[in-house]
Amino acid sequence: MNVSAALDWLFSTQFFGIKLGLENTRKLLQVAGADHPDAIVVHVAGTNGKGSTCAMIEALARAKGYKTGLFTSPHLVEFAERIRVNGEMIPRDALTAEILFLKNLVEGWEQSPTFFELALAVALRHFIRNSADFIILETGLGGRLDATNALRKDIAVLAPIGLDHQQYLGNTLAEIAGEKAAIIASGKPVVTAVQEPEAIAVIERTARERLSPLTVARADSDTPRPSLPGTHQLENAALALETMKQLNALPERTLADKALKSVQWPGRFERIGTPPLVLDGAHNEHAARVLAATWNEEFPGQRRLWSLPQPRTSTFGT
């Protein structure tokens, strides 16, 4: 089986739909030997800014000397973007081998694992094989019943929460915040971005009930400015820095500044060509407002022409 065939099989599992729940995920991770990585585990949820925050945490961890494993979704061009060790995408041969292993493992299961559960298992096995000692997991959908919540974590991180995926998570900000705050682990620290009042009330209550120390990260004049444009990215940087501080893993200031300035996260106000074409993955009202504000910061007084691309199928190398 080559990588294209392996990915064809993996993507075919999308026809199984979304199964919100953790029992099957735990079973998969256990039998795949991926349920207990010997690493610090950072779990990130939220509506917007999760990916950028994960990328900043990963850069800071590498600056501190950790070997990092980063699992994010979705990908923009190729599946391997989702799984990185020390910033390097999973190689084709490793990806093929892991998918084939899982394909054989789950053959005949009464309840077949979903695409996202399998992708998570691929990532964790790759991280373990490469001795990653600092793992960052981005939730796929929500938090409480997201596959990533089947793994133990050392800290929960909550990026800004807004209205999105209401058909799964609830129709109010409080309901959605409840789903996302459910990644908070008993007795483990939680760091949150500044949230709307309805969301922070739920986060505070959940942290209190689980005896989890809560810190609200706020950017100030001393927060290093990251390479990614927009005031909101300064807030994401503050969230990443506070996360590392709570883990007693914050690199010294010069290294932290350099790490944040090195972060690249395609599809987040990404400029291409001259005059610039700006690509951004804003997909809900909150993200669209942030995109418009960033445009006004970067191109004050200039008109913008919006274009919505048509969906396309992405594979490993096309």
Image (cartoon, rainbow, N blue to C red):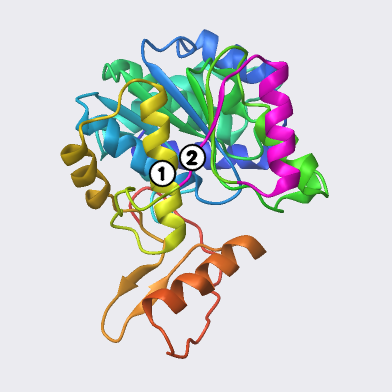
Q: Is residue 99 magenta?
A: no
**Which region shows up in magenta?**
195-218
Say left or right for 253 vs 289: left
Q: Is residue 105 above or below residue 205?
A: above
Residue tagged by mark 1? 238
For numbered disc 1, what is the local secondary structure?
helix
Q: Work out whether residue 154 can be spotted.
A: yes
For numbered disc 2, what is the local secondary structure?
loop
Quadrant of the image occupied by residue 80: top left
Amino acid type shown at disc 2:
Ala
Q: Is residue 206 magenta?
A: yes
Q: Position of residue 251 (x, y in %)?
A: 23, 30
Q: Work out whether residue 17 can be spotted.
A: no
Q: Residue furthest front?
A: 221
Residue tagged by mark 2? 217
Quadrant of the image occupied by residue 106: top right
Front one among 9 and 117? 117
The residue depicted at 34 percent of the width and 16 percent of the height is: 128
Q: Position of residue 32 (x, y in %)?
A: 48, 13
The residue depicted at 43 percent of the width and 61 percent of the height is: 231
Lower position in the chain sequence, tag 2 or tag 1: 2
Say left or right for 217 vs 211: left
The C terminus lies in quadrant: bottom left
Q: Marks 2 and 1: CB-CB under 8 Å?
A: yes
Say left or right for 236 vs 286: left
